[in-house]
Each structure stands twice: as C-alpha cells, then as structure tokens.
Image (cartoon, grey):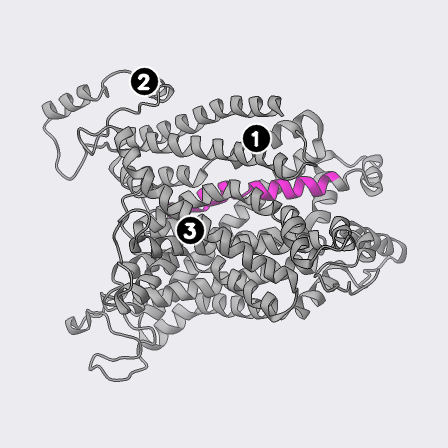
Amino acid sequence: MKQNPQKDDRGQIDSADLHIGPEYAVAERDVAELLTGRVVSGSSLWRDAWRRLLKNKLAVFGLVVVILLALGSLIGPTVIQRTTGYTYDAIPKDASLLKSFPPFRGPDGRFSFAHPMGTDSAGRDILARVLSGGQISLMVALIATLVSLIIGVSYGAIAGYAGGRLDELMMRIVDVLYSLPYVIIVIVLLALLPAKTPTAQLAQLFFALGAVSWLTMARIVRGQIMSLKNQEFVLAARATGVSTPKIIFRHLVPNALGPVIVYATLTIPTVMLSEAFLSFLGLGVRSPRVSWGSLAAEGAQNLAVYPWQLIFPGLTMALMLFSLNFVGDGLRDALDPQARRD
Amino acid sequence: MLRFIIRRVIVIVPMLFIIVSLTWVLVRLAPGNFYSGEKKLAPAVEKNLREKYGLDKPWYVQYGKVLKNIGRFDFGNSLKYEGQSVNQILLRGLPVSATLGITAYLIALLVGITMGTLAALKPNSWLDYASMTLAMLGISIPNFVLGPLLVLLFSLTLFWFPPALWNGFPSKSLVLPALTLSAIYIAYIARLTRSGMLEVMGSDYIRTARAKGLSERQVVTRHALRGGLLPVVSFSGPALAFLITGTVVVERVFALPGLGNYFINACFNRDEPLIIGIVAFIAISVLVFNLLVDISYAFIDPRIRY
C-alpha cells in the first residue's frame, strides 16, 4: 500500500492510490494475525490517517483548540470555584456587586483580574458561566451525535445489507423525512411539551436533536455497506455460519467506520449549533442551567449596554465550531480521501 | 419526466397529512390551553370559550375540521390575535420573510459563487486559503451571534443602519438582517462551488473546450460553471428549509414582523390554528420547492434522466 497519497495541484488524490479501499486494511491485518498468531502492528489505515491528519495544519490547530476548550469546560468551573468561589449561578451577597462589570474591571472601576470576561447583570462571573455553558453544550452535542450515530448506522446498515424491497422502502422513508421541515416540528415539540425538570429537559433535547440528524448518516452507511457486502470476507463469514446481525455489525460496520467517523465529527458542530439555536429561542437549555446558546440569548438582550455579555459566550462558541469544522474536514481528507470536499 | 413529476406531486399529499397530523397531536398532547394564562377563568367563561372554538366536540370532529380547512387553504381564525384569520396573518408575514430570504439568498449566490470560483481557479493559493477560511468562519459564527454583533457595530456604534425596523425591500432596514442571514449560505455556496469547479476543471470536456481554442474566461463561464454549479443547485433544496430556520432567528434578532416571529409566538401562545397554518404553509413550500429543484436538475444537466 502506498503510504502517502500525493495530492495534485487540484487537491485531488492521485487515482493510483484509490485501489486500496479501507476494507482491505482490516482484512489484511486479520489475515496476518491469523498466520502469525500475534498482533500485527503494521502501517494500518488508522495510522496512515493519523499521519495525514497531522500534516494538515488547520486540522491540528482545530484539534488543539477543541481539546483546550473541552478541558477548560470540563475542569475550568471547578478550578474557578476552588480558587475564587465564583460559579455559574453564584450571585454575590454584597448588593453593590449585583450589576454587570466590564471585563477586567473591579467594583471600583479599576483594573482587576477578578472577572476576565466581566460579570452579567446579576453579578455572576461570565468566565465561569461560559465554561459551565461549554459543559452543557458539549454534552448535548456529544450525546445527541451518539443518538444520531446509533440510529443512523443501524438503519443504514440494515437497509444496505437487506437490499431489495426493504431497502427501497427504508430509503424512501429517509427521502420523505429529508424533505420535512423538521426544525419546525422540533420547535413545536419543545415549545408545547416542556419537560418538568431541567434534566428531563436536557434528555428531551438529546433525543429531539439526535432523532433529526441521523438521515445523512444512514445514507452514508448504506452506501458503504452496499459496496462491501459482496466481497469475499462477507461470503467467508456467511459460509462459516455467522449470523446475519453479526455479519452486519461485526464484519461490515467496522469496515465502514472511516466515513462514519468523519460524518460524526461533522455532526457534532451541527448539533451544537442546533442546540444553541433552540436555546436562543428559549426552547433548549433553561435557567438555571446555561449553555453557550442560552448565554448568547441573554447577552443579545443586553447588547446595547453590556456588549461583553454577548461577545464572550458568542465568540467562544464560534471558536469551538470553527475548530470542530476544521477537525472534521481534516479527518475527512485523512480518512476518506475519495470523499468530495463540500 | 412527466411520470416522475406526477409521482412526486402525489407524494406531497400524504406527507402534508403526516406533518399536519403530527403537529395537531403535539398541540393536543400539550398541557394547558390558549386561554390558560396567569389568571384562572371562571368556569362559565371557560365553557363559553370552549364552545365558541369547538373544543367541546369530540376529537375526531375537531381533527376532521382541521383537515378540511387545509384542503380548502383556509386555516380559520387565530385564537390569540382575535378577529384575524390565519390567512390574513400569513399574508402579512410572508412578504417580510420572503423578501428577507430571497435577498439573502441572492447575496449568497453572488458572493458565494464568485468566492468559490476564484478559489477553485487558483487552488492552494492565498486567495483559496483566504476565501475558504472566510467560508469556515461563516459556517461557524451562529447567526444569532453575528446579527447582534453587526447591530453593535453598524447600528449602535457607527449609526449607519437601524437596529430593528422594517421598511420593505429597497431600504436601509434590510441590509443588516439580509447580511446576517446570508453569511452561512455564502459560506456553503463558496465551498460547494469550489469543490464542484475543481472536479469539473479536470474533466475531459473542459480539455476539449480549451483545445478548440476558447479563452480561459469562456471556458470558465460558458462550460465549467454549468457543470460546476450542480452541487449549488442541489443545495438549493435543503437551503430553503435552512433559510426558514434562519429567518426565525434573524426575525427575532431584528424584531421583524415575519412568519418566523409569528410562528414562535404562536407556539408559546398555543394558538392552534396559527401553528397548524404556518406549519402547513412551510411544509407545502418546502415540498414544492424540493420538487422544483429536482426538475431543474434535468434542465441543467442533460445526463440526468428520471
């Protein structure tokens, strides 16, 4: 296998590199392991992809920023609480502090490190709120993506493997769902059936977002499975009496993992944006919990007087989305060089 | 072709039925009612209200009425905006949303195609990187952050444009909302154009066009763009659906009296006829538009047959 497909000046991969599909990388290794009896650690598909990813400067930049922001959101709120006592919902006891200070300004109007992003109208530290909001935004995005992944992969794999009438029917349903204005239905759902507790509200959000974002995943997986299912390793599995579900999920799906990972990475920012959109409309994450979307909504209301209330949460979210998109694009180029860049 | 169109038109009816039924069920499952405000109504008043709006009838009668109304394109009267029919509200909100959406999409086509083509003609040049980074920014900055930021800069600091006003089509009040809404489409279209053009520029028919001595400008504008823009055309279908969600946000940010704003308010007010009216209207337009996009493929790319 050639290790570094060279891109020509049009950004396309030399056709000579395309003969080796991802499916062989796994099969080859399996055979090697079978023959030698030990785990072969040759140059795998994943290692090649990783090397290609590291060559892409923008993707590396994105990856670093994503990790930093994720770590910051994960441990930041605790660190801030331990060192300063500020949390996303701690309102200061002193009545003179119950107002919005600009970034890096103390109550006396002079420079201070106490609130690097300022405070909101109730005197709460915006940095703590942005980091806590990041926790919720990331969690919603990850879990909703996972939901869409489970639905999309199972649906696509079953349709692709079954073929024939069933496939026709299942894909027709996807076509139909594609043309539904589902955001409208999600809005109706969330506006009319508000959950009783904040946790239930979050769960509702996961499922609402996950349930509407699995369609493209199903199409991608189906296409992959269809091209894989007539290959020898599937025939071999069938000949040795492996059950159909096991063929689908143990033999076929792992071989389609590249595009699945790429698309899942690209789903995360989309879902994050949808969550923020719904929270902005007052339908997603609700007070006292905060997410980047609900913080931006709050900030947008006080825009004229306290612009920093919008700028910090808004730009943090934009930076996260920007980086996630770069990582997704980079992964696509690395894992799935045949994919169209659009 | 004709058979394809007929089949697709027939499919629209059951889909509309599903969407409307789903919405109706959701409205009915929801606790509370349009009159259940902060004050509790006297039982007699409540009974009268229920009678007036037919809520005392069994569910299948009410559901049947909803379906009949949609069949006649008459969605009844709004519950919240008293004395106004849903159709009147639709007619009032639609021009605002449509003007905003169409202006934004035209801006996006113009800017996006230019950016994408320039990037594709000189791949891996600074122009390419600059326009693709810009496009990525457009995708990453949510419109409800971009809108207020533009307001902060151009309305509250520079005083160039009004922050929240609607004066119809050629007016200053349209600039900021349309720009906000178009940002993400500029980005998508630029990326789609770039990848489409890259693919086409390497193909045989472009080599033929060059070989017969056409100037590079002619090759690009006459031959390459036609094939290279196919992804943009297919994006126009989903774009409408996105555009609708986008207008919901932008109308809220700029307080514009469009359909999106009415829709959100209707959901919060549980204004059943208005919710169903707007959902049905949006669904019909999305379905019809998708059909038109599919038909237009065949005209742009003669290789596509149905």
Q: Amino acid at mark 2?
A: Lys
In the picture of the structure, the residue carrying the numbered disc 3 is A275
- Which image quadrant for residue A313? bottom left
Measuring from the top left, give residue B119's x and y in whole percent. Answer: 61, 62
**Observer-nearest residue: B241 or B289?**
B289
Q: Residue at x 36, y 44 (%)?
A: B99
SS of the residue at dot 2?
helix
In the picture of the structure, the residue carrying the numbered disc 1 is A173
**Observer-nearest residue: A98 or B54?**
B54
Q: Is residue A277 magenta?
A: no
- Which image quadrant for residue A300? bottom left
Task: State if disc 2 and disc 1 touch (CB < 8 Å).
Answer: no
Give the magenta part as a residue range. A201-226
Q: Residue at x 67, y 65 (%)?
A: A53
| Other residues around mark 3 within 10 Å, as few (<14) / some (14–19) / many (≥20) | many
Q: Amino acid at mark 3?
A: Glu
- Which image quadrant for residue B173? bottom left
Mark 2 to mark 3 CA distance (whole Å): 35 Å
In the picture of the structure, the residue carrying the numbered disc 2 is B65
Q: Residue at x 46, y 58 (%)?
A: A138
The answer to whether residue A96 is left or right of residue A180 is left
Mark 1 to mark 2 CA distance (whole Å): 28 Å
Q: Chain of mark 1?
A: A
